[in-house]
Image (cartoon, helix red, strand yellow):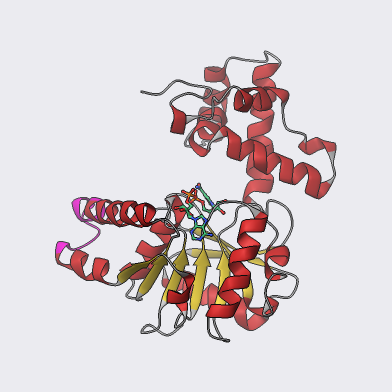
Amino acid sequence: MERNRRIGVVGGGTMGNGIAQVFAQIGYPVVLVDSSPEALDRAAAQIQKSLERLVKKGTLAEQDVPEILERISRNTKPEALREAQLVVEAIFEDAQVKRELFARLDEVTGPDCILASNTSSISITEIAGATKRADRVIGMHFMNPVPVMTLVEIIRGLATSNETYKAVEGLTKELGKTPVEVQDYPGFVSNRVLMPMINEAVYCLMEGVATKESIDTVMKLGMNHPMGPLTLADFIGLDVCLHIMEVLHSGLGDDKYRPCPLLRKMVAAGRLGRKVGRGFYEYE
Ligand code: NAD
């Protein structure tokens, strides 16, 4: 990719602000688009906080911070992405909303612009179908928190060209991250393997196989996972876990992916995890 050409990021939430930050850190001018001006303000504050953390840790020079922040411009309209060479979408996880956005991006961006989605579970092929450039649509699945996690799953839709794949793979390496090539199937690799493990941990809890603390301890100490599956589920959000299990269940048509009834019950009760202060565990 060309260092002087813009990278667009649409959606300035949890993932979008991290994605904007990492591109600005390696020198790309970034245009961050969010339909909500408040979300853009929050994103700017979050990026500043995150950069200050890196300075404290000693991994970023203090004098570089203003320059990085200046590289990120903010806008509420996709039209601001006209000059972009790549746009990474990180808006709500809703297929219809994403398809509408991609149709719009197809109209407003130049013909050589690559359109990437950070979706966790929606088919890249389906999103690409909303555009007239399916060969230049791809999945770029960053992990949370973006500035810290080094994996990017790169998902090839049915029509994604080799040229598009190579460009995005190269850019991922420029970011200092590790690209992994994945084909477009429900849950890709990360959630196809992770979510059934979490779901099975919830079954263990529901069936009384062990307490929540014991289940988490087994996986932490026994498998060397940095956190247990129920703690991790609280961190991700139980509604997000349930949604992804439903995508796996319907997309793969196999009952081995059926969401655990206790997971459904927790979501119905509004115990969505850390973000609401209550999931399998209670939070301050
Ligand atoms: P979020 O809710 O924190 O942020 C979404 C942002 O998108 C909001 O600021 C909202 O105002 C904006 N938005 C919504 N519709 C828009 C539109 N049409 N145009 C412009 N802006 C719009 O969401 P998030 O957690 O950052 O997730 C974003 C995407 O990343 C989702 O597809 C999700 O599946 C994926 N993802 C999330 C995580 C995670 O851990 N949060 C990890 C990997 C992938």
Q: Residue at left 42%, top 57%?
A: 12
Quadrant for the C terminus, please.
Answer: top left
Q: Is residue 54 magenta?
A: yes
User: Residue 45: where, in percent of width, then height?
Assistant: 27, 53
**Is residue 253 found left or right of 210 in the rendered image?**
right
Q: Is residue 154 left or right of residue 234?
A: right
In the image, farthest residue toward the left: 63
Report x, y in % for residue 161.
68, 80
Q: Quadrant of residue 242?
A: top right
| Residue found at x 39% / y 57% | 17
Q: Position of residue 149 (x, y in %)?
A: 44, 53
145 above or below 21?
Answer: above
Regarding residue 44, the answer to whether it shows in the image is yes
- In magenta, the rendered stretch is 53-62
The rendered magenta stretch, by its main secondary structure, is classed as helix
Q: Residue at x 30, y 56 (%)?
A: 47
In percent of the image, x 59 and y 79: which residue is there? 107
The count of marks equals: 0
